[in-house]
Image (cartoon, rainbow, N blue to C red):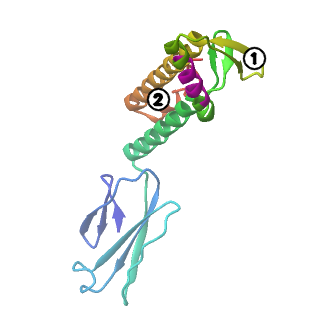
């Protein structure tokens, strides 16, 4: 038995198409009873680190084994999927990084967003009622800043501008991932830098 360049396994003059995998695999062929497989051959393809499937019948005899090389296109596709996932994870991390606003740094994690939302609602209510509003806000560096209603209401807008810029950068990175035609192209994509502050 042997594997051809176009990823077919030849066993007893019969040809079997093999899958395109992103990793190397071991291909084994067994001679089995025809009531188990009409052509009398059972084939297993075990990717690196995978669990081998074996014939579930009596009388199976190993014909031979061969190494199936990783398919370059499948390997590239898997690397693209992995890099896109890393871009998404970094995008999420960037979204929750502290925000620079009014020359100060404000926490922007989920809990902080809840606090900002509550303070904005209070500021909007004060504006609607024609009442004064001011709040002393503790910044990410543990310093304080006093915000009036308009400054408080402006904070979510600044956050959304930053989130939009982060999403735009992530889209550009993923476009570069999609356009890559080699693993070297992917390795050249720097997902750690270039994010908006």
Choose between 83 and 70: the one closer to the eye.
Answer: 83
| Residue assigned mark 1 | 144
Q: Residue 184: where, in percent of width, then height?
A: 49, 32
Would you say 3 lies left or right of 106 here? left
User: The C terminus is located in which quarter?
Assistant: top right
Q: Residue 32: where, in percent of width, then height?
A: 32, 83
Q: Which mark is residue 135?
A: none
Front: mark 2 or 1: 1
| Residue assigned mark 2 | 185
In the picture, residue 195 is in which quadrant?
top right
Specify the farthest residue to the right: 142
Q: Mark 2 falls on what kind of element?
A: helix
Residue displayed at 35% across by 71% down: 43
Q: Closer to the N terminus: mark 2 or mark 1? A: 1
How many C-alpha atoms fall within 10 Å of the one at disc 2: few (<14), some, or many (≥20)?
A: few
Q: Mark 1 falls on what kind of element?
A: strand
Residue displayed at 33% across by 76% down: 42
Q: Give the range drawn in magenta.
A: 115-124
């Amino acid at each position: 038995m042997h594997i051809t360049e176009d990823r077919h396994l030849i066993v007893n003059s019969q040809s079997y198409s093999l899958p395109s995998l992103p990793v190397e695999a071991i291909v084994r062929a067994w001679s089995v009873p025809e009531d188990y497989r009409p052509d009398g051959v059972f084939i297993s393809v075990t990717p690196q680190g995978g669990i081998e499937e074996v014939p579930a019948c009596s009388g199976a005899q190993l014909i031979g084994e061969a190494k199936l090389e990783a398919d370059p296109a499948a390997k590239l596709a898997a690397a693209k999927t992995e890099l896109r996932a890393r871009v998404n994870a970094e995008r999420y991390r960037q979204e929750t990084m502290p925000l620079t606003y009014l020359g100060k740094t404000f926490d922007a994690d989920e809990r902080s967003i809840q606090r900002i939302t509550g303070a904005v609602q209070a500021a909007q209510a004060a504006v609607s009622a024609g009442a004064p509003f001011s709040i002393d806000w503790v910044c990410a560096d543990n310093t304080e800043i006093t915000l009036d209603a308009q400054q408080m209401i402006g904070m979510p807008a600044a956050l959304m501008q930053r989130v939009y810029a982060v999403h735009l950068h992530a889209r550009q990175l993923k476009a570069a991932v999609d356009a890559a035609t080699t693993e070297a192209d992917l390795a050249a994509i720097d997902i750690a830098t270039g994010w908006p502050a």
